[in-house]
Amino acid sequence: MQYTRYEKGFTLVELLVALIVSSVILAAVATLAFAMSTANVSTDDTSSKQAQVRFATLRISELIRHCKLICAAPGNDLVIWKADDNPENGKIDVLELAYIEKGNNSERIRVLEFTSCPDWLSSWFANQSFQIAVLQLDWLKALFVSLCQETYARLIPQCSGVTFMVDAEPPNTKFVSITLDLLENNVVRPYQINAALRGWAGNLLSADGQSIVGDDD
């Protein structure tokens, strides 16, 4: 007669306990993986926003520090006279201008510059008796954009609450402070960009500050 030997196996209770323990471990691993993934996304978002602020700070600081005048503040812009590339005419040329824009809804910061312009438009603007006053007009930038070749440097593509603050009204401005808010990981954080002119060209202004009356000589 043969006897069948039965090996002892897992009971139903043991299987259920093992299943529960495994489920708890897998849930903990999944939670940890999700938390790490969320942390990486948050870190990437913060790093990207702070990189934008650093680049904007560098670009704006260099532009303002080395410019000759903050000429005007029409609408949502600051108009910068970057440099006098043609000092013999003693005037501001269109290609020497830059606009720091904050957008109609303060939703971004970018710099507008011109690389080419029709000769007649350059001549017309150079012959204006009150160039500083003309630069205060909102429609002038639209005219330049429609007729000239423009380039944009997008510094901070998405922000809010952008405010330009100056120590004195253009063209007597020597210090500029730009405040803005950035949404980082669903938290609004404030930032500030400060810049000062290294050499203010107030000696070129007329007594009323509305025109350029001389050159560096």
Image: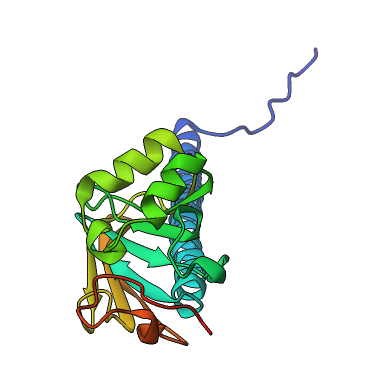
User: In the picture shown, does residue 102 fall above or below 20?
Assistant: below
From the top left corner, tell me how far across and down residue 88 is, in percent: 55, 70
Q: Residue at x 51, y 77 (%)?
A: 66
Q: Quadrant of the N terminus?
A: top right
Quadrant hosting residue 132: bottom left
Quadrant hosting residue 131: bottom left
The answer to whether residue 96 is left or right of residue 108 is right
Residue 36 appears in the rendering: yes
Q: Residue at x 35, y 84 (%)?
A: 202
Q: Residue at x 73, y 25 (%)?
A: 5
The answer to whether residue 71 is left or right of residue 86 is left
Quadrant hosting residue 102: bottom left
Residue 161 appears in the rendering: no
User: In the picture shown, does residue 160 fall above or below 30?
Assistant: below
Front one among 43 and 91:
91
The answer to whether residue 152 is left or right of residue 134 is right
From the top left corner, tell me how far across and down residue 206 is, in percent: 28, 79
Front one among 184 and 132:
132
From the top left corner, tell me how far across and down residue 16 is, in percent: 44, 35
From the top left corner, tell me how far across and down residue 181 is, in percent: 26, 63
User: In the picture shown, does residue 194 fall above or below 83?
Assistant: below
Q: Residue at x 38, y 43 (%)?
A: 144
